[in-house]
Amino acid sequence: MFPGIEAYDVEVTVAERDVREALAVRPDDVEAAEELSFARNVFLPLTTACRYTCTYCTYYDPPGQATLMTPEEVRETCRRGAAAGCTEALFTFGDDPDERYTEIHDELAELGHDSIHTYLREVCEIALAEGLLPHSNPGDQTYEEMAAVADVNASMGVMLETTAEVQAHGGPRSKVPGQRLNTIANAGKHGIPFTTGVLVGLGETWRDRAESLLAIRELDRRYGHVQEVIVQPVTDNERWDGGSPSTATMRRAVAMARAVLPESVSVQVPPNLMDARDVVDCGIDDLGGVSPVTDDHVNPEYAWPALRELEDVADYAGVPLRERLPTYERYLDETWLSERVLAALDASDEAGERYRAVRADA
Ligand SMILES: O=c1nc2n(C[C@H](O)[C@H](O)[C@H](O)CO)c3cc(O)ccc3cc-2c(=O)[nH]1
Ligand SMILES: C[C@H]1O[C@@H](n2cnc3c(N)ncnc32)[C@H](O)[C@@H]1O
Ligand code: MET
Ligand code: SF4
């Protein structure tokens, strides 16, 4: 059992034998993937307000200084993305942003909403209308909050980060591992294709990393909804002086993820936060969402590589580079996606073409 978990309706335990096995994995023990995929997205930072204050995060603004993207801004960014061939609208923002930020509460009220979750639904609908597939990463959600957006997302995500209690989440306003696990389980109950991952370098131990990856595996065994696991290095910035993990650490963490997770689950590293070439032989098969039109608002100092650079990574690995949708292929059907999302997918130029190719293959 992990910290804080007794407060939630999810129970996750991992076997000591599996932890030991994971701890023994080294980069040489895993095989390199046969292709590398990526998705083209627009990043929509819906709001910079957040109830938490993670010490490594430069994304959030303090109460009184946060903003909310308007529906018009969302539409405009989606249009630019669609015109640039993007398929994904990535909504990433602070957890429960309206909780103690009166300005966000007021702005939501002006737009006719009493919570961020119903507003998220509205902007997902805008993205769908503009031909993009919504992938929302709203932080923790209850089962009911997620119900407000389940049928307008093509996939969703929340980083588990770590099952350990770490200083980086410390203080009174702290992320709780149990609640993150609960969110991942909620997505499983809703049948939402899901992205999660670990953040490496928060002060967690190797045992914590093994347990985190095994906890993700356990939830995927229950619901089958985990499409990819991101192995993300924490990056240095003006709020975080804890340093970034070494290449050797990232290599071992990626290999551990590959060995622990079933083959059906992709292992992703973000190519703007590290040199992906350093881990291409450790089992990664995905380079995540990259954007030709927007910044990585979580790590704004780290520019997205151009398509050319992704091709260089694939060339270096000696494997083909393939563009994918925010939803992995095995989830592109009626069991996982709503009629609305499937209809929007079929109607969109860029994503629709890929979708029909997958259907024709099946
Ligand atoms: O640009 C970013 N994209 C992030 N993404 C986007 C991700 O790379 C793509 O949206 C997915 O691969 C779907 O295509 C996340 C998605 C999640 O569901 C959960 C966490 C992240 C983290 C980041 C991130 O830090 N920066
Ligand atoms: C969107 C995701 O970005 C991650 N995140 C937040 N701050 C940082 C940082 N400094 N370095 C790397 N990842 C970060 C969180 O884990 C969040 O889930
Ligand atoms: C910059 S983090 C954005 C998503 C959410 N607040 C999380 O931590 O998971
Ligand atoms: S990482 Fe996410 S939850 Fe933590 S402070 Fe930043 S926006 Fe909030």
Image (cartoon, rainbow, N blue to C red):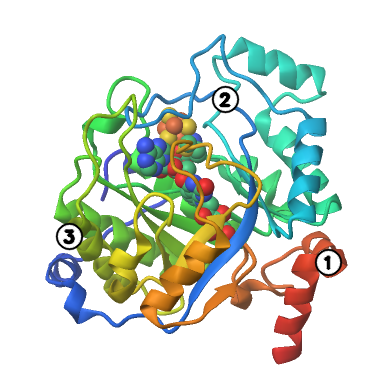
User: Image quarter for residue 221?
Assistant: bottom left
Near-viewer residue (98 or 256): 256
Mark 2 or mark 1: which comes first in sequence?
2
The answer to whether 212 appears left or right of 219 in the picture is: left
Q: Residues within 10 Å of mark 3 (few under 14, many from 20)?
A: few
Q: Secondary structure at mark 1?
A: helix
Percent coordinates x, y for residue 191 in the rendering: 61, 63
Q: Is residue 183 visible?
A: no
Mark 3 to mark 2: distance in Å? 37 Å
Which residue is at a point 73% across and 22% down the rendered structure image?
108
The correct choice, above or below, for 123 with respect to 193 in the image is above
Check disc 3 and report the residue beneath it: 248
Near-viewer residue (338 or 354): 354
Percent coordinates x, y for residue 214 in the rendering: 29, 63
Q: Secondary structure at mark 2?
A: loop
The answer to whether 21 appears left or right of 119 in the picture is: left
Q: Amino acid at mark 2?
A: Pro
Near-viewer residue (145 or 251): 251
Q: Amino acid at mark 3?
A: Ala
Mark 1 or mark 3: which comes first in sequence?
3
Check disc 2 and report the residue beneath it: 97
Mark 3: is the Cβ under 8 angstroms from ligand 2? no
Q: Is residue 357 visible?
A: yes
Which residue is at a point 78% across and 61% down the rendered structure image?
341
Check disc 1 and report the residue beneath it: 349
